[in-house]
Image (cartoon, helix red, strand yellow):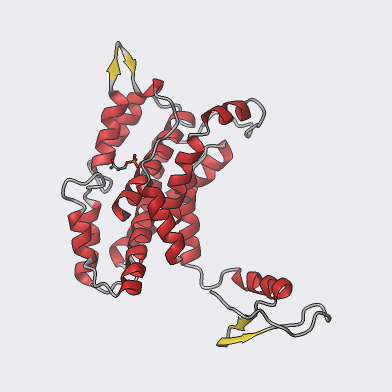
Amino acid sequence: MVHNGIEYGDMQLICEVYNIMKDILKMSNDEIADTFDEWNKGTLDSFLIQITADILRFKENDKYVLDSIRDSAGQKGTGKWTGIASLEYGVPVTLIGESVFARCLSSLIDERGRASTQLKGPNVQSFDGDKKQFIEYLGQALYASKIISYAQGFMLMREAAKQYGWKLNYGSIALMWRGGCIIRSVFLGNIKSAYDKNESLENLLLDSFFTDAINKCQQGWRKVIATATVYGIPIPCLSTALAFYDGYRAKRLPANLIQAQRDYFGAHTYELLDKPGEFIHTNWTGHGGNITASTYTH
Ligand code: 3PG
């Protein structure tokens, strides 16, 4: 299930960079295919990147087949299953979730057609930046987001293992996914090495190989997201990956305010930073008494 969820994420990430190359950089199918071929020689080397290059070049009757395929994605449900499990176990597997919703949004094809005649996007000039540099940034954004997606998938398995008392061998799982699977890639070997180094690794992002990789990609990743946003190109997976990264590395998040709001309207109580485990209620309005909600859930 997690393999297939990750597959959904990888596919959507590839679609987002394809969209950017096509609609912002105005690249032809062959140019995009050449870029994927180039990426396939490095850290992004994978079956999905390789078939994407083949698909982009494929012609029938002198016409690119890809360009006449209806942009409404189907699904048999394994990505949705991963999303449901993530919500069930309370694990922020945001990228796979977004990839499922991106397919759902694509399938509203008639409604989108009608909306496109009324809802305006930004008014922007054609791209006049350094195209070669930006393509490099795109590769970095794809790689960094992929790291986040796999880290999230492994977080889900780790939580399930905790809840069911399973002893999972995460390195072997990564290795297994290299054998004939849709997500087979060089990258899975790096995941295997991370778990070989430390089998109780708390999160893939904390392995030095992945920490360094994200650091190297970070500038390009942010530039791609900023540019796509300015141009009005939808990038649900690239952007949720970065939002997750910025949230995961944050010592402080604004959830203190959520707790205060919950306590204000529902007397749901909150904990103080220096007294975790002790739940208190504040009478925020001066009326309404000191009654607290009877159940507390994180
Ligand atoms: C597959 O064929 O690899 C999976 O079943 C995914 O299929 P789907 O994209 O139709 O869900």
Name the image quarter holding the N terminus: bottom left
- Please state which of residues 18 and 150 is positioned toward the viewer in this rendering: 150
Give the residue furthest to the front: 294
**Where does the image place residue 62, in percent across and percent down from the top left?**
31, 12
- Please state which of residues 144 and 272 is positioned toward the viewer in this rendering: 272
Give the residue furthest to the left: 179
Number of labelled discs? 0
Left or right: where 49 falls relative to 126: left
**Where does the image place residue 266, in percent across and percent down from the top left?**
70, 73
**Where does the image place residue 260, in percent across and percent down from the top left?**
68, 74
Q: At x 69% / y 83%, what residue is drawn?
A: 281
Can you tell which quarter of the image residue 268 is in?
Answer: bottom right
Give the residue furthest to the right: 287
Q: Is residue 216 visible?
A: no
- Please state which of residues 31 and 263 is positioned toward the viewer in this rendering: 263
The answer to whether residue 161 is above or below residue 295 is above
Q: At x 38% / y 45%, what residue is drawn?
A: 77
The answer to whether residue 275 is above or below residue 209 is below
**Where does the image place residue 165, in percent across and percent down from the top left?**
29, 75
Q: Is residue 144 visible?
A: yes
**Quadrant of the picture in which ligand 1 is shown:** top left
Left or right: where 81 falls relative to 292: left
Q: At x 21% / y 70%, what residue is drawn?
A: 197
Left or right: where 47 falls relative to 91: left
